[in-house]
Amino acid sequence: MQAYHDMVKYVLQNGVRKENRTGVATLSCFAYFYRVNLQAGFPLLTTKAMYFESMLHELFWYLSGEEHIRGLQTKTRIWDSWADAEGRLETAYGRFWRRYPVPNVGLPGEKWGTRWVNVDPATGRKVFDQIQFVVDTLKEIKQNAQTANLRRMVITAWHPGNAAESKLPPCHYTFCLNVLGDKLNCHLTQRSADIALGVPFNLACYSLLTMMLAKETGYQVGEFAHTLVDAHIYENHRAGLREQLERAPRLLPTIKLADKPFHDLRFADVKLENYHPHPAIKFDVAV
């Protein structure tokens, strides 16, 4: 994963010191971009051991559409610092992926994709399933040459009203799928990016999601691309990252998915193969 190492080097060399809400300052750069070829292997970092199972549990939590972490807490505690005593979150990515609120009554002239609108049983409000919209659109592109160049497969976890009040509004807040020939590509935009801890998980999570969607809709995987608006390294992460830079990347692992429909996939249906990383490096979380 030379692309990751290049990013670490760039921010260490060019970052500007910034104070922030956590009390731990960062070295920050504006608008860093990188891309990886998913056909070269699954981009799980090998210069430190990654907790693949935690990432996988988190991805399936996103896809569940839940607004709380009560089930996720039995598998991993990575969201505990931002949840209330009952496990509820002010912002939950999957809640907007699968149940994005839409107006009960729109303004004159507005149109809404009623095919993907449901009534949320918990609130009685109309909600839009962005994941199902993308799956259906990808299948339509595959079957109908007249739709081959559609560029509307955008999923957002950002709701302005929610973000204005949330303790931690979405960092990786929107992603876009793109079909080029027979390949499915994904571009993720992230407003705030913790390079030592968060970005390796974001890279692996969205790459795996792209692989899952490609398998469901009949495409080959293409590229994962990532724009980091505020790309930063916390000051207490610098030593660990310098140690990581001294390690040579190893061959990337591969992913094996069970032959099941996308919505039927579960944790046990995703297998990581041939992962042989260097030892883990401990990075403290800035909350």
Image (cartoon, rainbow, N blue to C red):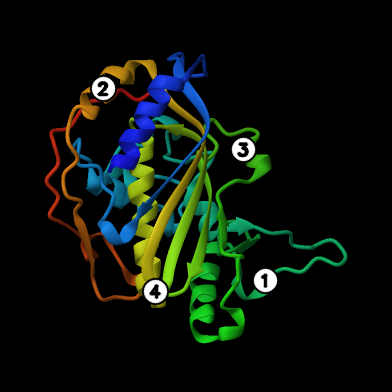
Q: Is residue 244 above or below residue 258?
A: above
Give the residue at x 12% y 54%: 274
Label 1 crowd bin: few (<14), some (14–19), many (20+), radius 10 Å: few
* Label 2 to label 4: alpha-carbon separation: 38 Å
Give whichever of 49, 75 is nearer the camera.
Answer: 49
Give whichever of 259, 194 is nearer the camera.
Answer: 194
Regarding residue 130, the answer to whether it shows in the image is: yes
What's the mark number on residue 219?
4
For disc 2, the marked residue is 242
What's the mark number on residue 163?
3
Tell me which numbered mark, 2 or 3, is placed earlier along the sequence.
Answer: 3
Give the residue at x 57% y 59%: 154
Q: Nearer the viewer, mark 2 or mark 1?
A: 2
Determine whether label 2 and label 1 are within 8 Å by CB.
no
Regarding residue 70, the answer to whether it shows in the image is: no
Determine whether label 2 and label 4 are within 8 Å by CB.
no
Residue 48 image point, x, y percent? 20, 35
> Please, what is the three-letter code of the amino acid marked with disc 4?
Tyr
Give the residue at x 42% y 58%: 63
- Residue 256 is left or right of residue 214, and the answer is left
What's the mark number on residue 50?
none
> Please, what is the three-letter code of the amino acid marked with disc 1?
Gly
* Label 4 to label 1: alpha-carbon separation: 25 Å
For disc 1, the marked residue is 113
